[in-house]
Amino acid sequence: MPGFELFDFEERKAVNDLFDSNGGVLFAHGFHNIRNGVFKVRDFEKLAAKMFNVKYAQAVSSCTAALRVALAALELNSDDEVIIPSFTFVATAEAVIESRAKLVIVDIDKSFTMCPKSLELAITDKTAAVIPVHMMSAPANLEKICEIAKRHNIRIIEDAAWGVGSTWRGKALGTIGDIGCYSFDAGKCISTGEGGMILTNNKILYKKARAYHDHGHEYATNISRGEEGAIGVGFNYRMTELQGAIGIVQLGKLNKIISLQRLNKAKLKKILVDGGFQFDFRMIMDKGEGGDALFFTLKSRKQTLDFLKLMKQNGLSTKNVPDAMRWHFAKHWSHMFQKNSLYKDTYQIQWQKSADILERSIAIPIMVKMTDEEICEIGSKLLQINKKV
Ligand SMILES: *Cc1c(COP(=O)(O)O)cnc(C)c1O
């Protein structure tokens, strides 16, 4: 889980330093006379752009906001269609609904990310964008998705809420499509409490995103706040200086967080493989995946329920699959579709292929601070259960 596990005196100090140095200007812009040149959000953006090797980084208030802003930057019309996978957090769907584009949801495959074949089948002449989701730090099949998107002239927004610090072919997740979106909420790889970021190499998209997240303000550092031009309609999705200050500290811990999680996941997987674990692990798209959870898929629904029952008896927990499926699998989102005539068809589909995978799968949470003893204990309990089901 990550960022919040390593919240420490450094984050506390960053907040105190902010108050000490400028008396507590928490707004990212303006107040030039009293802020003593302290701009934490801007510094956070610069550091992130450098670390993830991308031209532009725009901090926002959450990843949900980042997705909404990314869609705004694409300037979609109400009959444009945006394709997302059936397994993601509801936020991906909400951002499309809020942008008033038509939401199209397609199946996942054994990688637990968007199935490229299902994507291709869902494309129409109205498709404007696709949002692959790097679910729980697993890279989506970007090779195929990028190829399909290019062939059909569709924009790619990567939902890399969970992908901060993970890579695909050596590139940071979130920097491969047209726009990438990061989350820094309390459950993600690094955290600013709440927070998000947009990444892009496209200057035009960056300018539009930057303006949209801040009521249409044109970004200007050399004139007073209020004197800048207005680019268009926008909203308020700004990040505060407190979050920026914490984000800078957390970025410094990211490599450690990712490498410890990868290591802990590899240790647990090895114990299971060496012990003759009979179930399939998640299909891996790239070795740059993070280590947020260890997924495996059982043979039947009944066996999965039996396995889960024994896990509970042994005090073992799961991560989202299956405990929070309500929030992560489109099959359970009728509350979002029923009252909206635009989505009547969407809700009819039911995503059978995804259901078949998700309803037979279990995800084990991997923590940064797991000790070897804890990993061994979880491993041996899972192996015992494996023999009984
Ligand atoms: C957490 C999450 C989001 C939303 O992030 P917030 O920063 O909490 O708004 C979006 N997409 C996915 C896949 C997520 O897991």
Image (cartoon, rainbow, N blue to C red):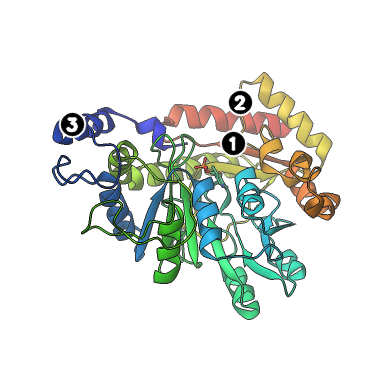
- The image position of residue 374, as x and y in percent, is 48, 27
Other-residue count near label 3 (Cα within 10 Å), few / some / many at <14 / 14–19 / ≥20: few
Q: Secondary structure at mark 3?
A: loop
Q: Which residue is mark 2?
A: 316
Left or right, residue 24 beside residue 388: left
Rendered image: mark on residue 364: 1
Q: Work out whether 144 lies above or below 137.
A: below
Q: Work out whether 229 lies above or below 253.
A: below
What amino acid does circle 3 point to? Gly
Q: Secondary structure at mark 2?
A: loop
Left or right, residue 48 beside residue 184: left
Q: Which residue is mark 3?
A: 23
Q: CA distance from mark 1 to mark 3?
A: 44 Å
* Of pointers 1 and 3, the one earlier in the residue sequence: 3
Q: Quadrant of residue 101?
A: bottom right
- The image position of residue 259, as x and y in percent, is 39, 46
- The image position of residue 212, as x and y in percent, is 46, 56
Q: Work out whether 361 lies above or below 48.
A: above
Residue 162 visible? The answer is no
- The image position of residue 349, as x and y in percent, is 84, 53
* Of pointers 2 and 1, the one earlier in the residue sequence: 2
Q: Residue at x 66, y 62 (%)?
A: 82
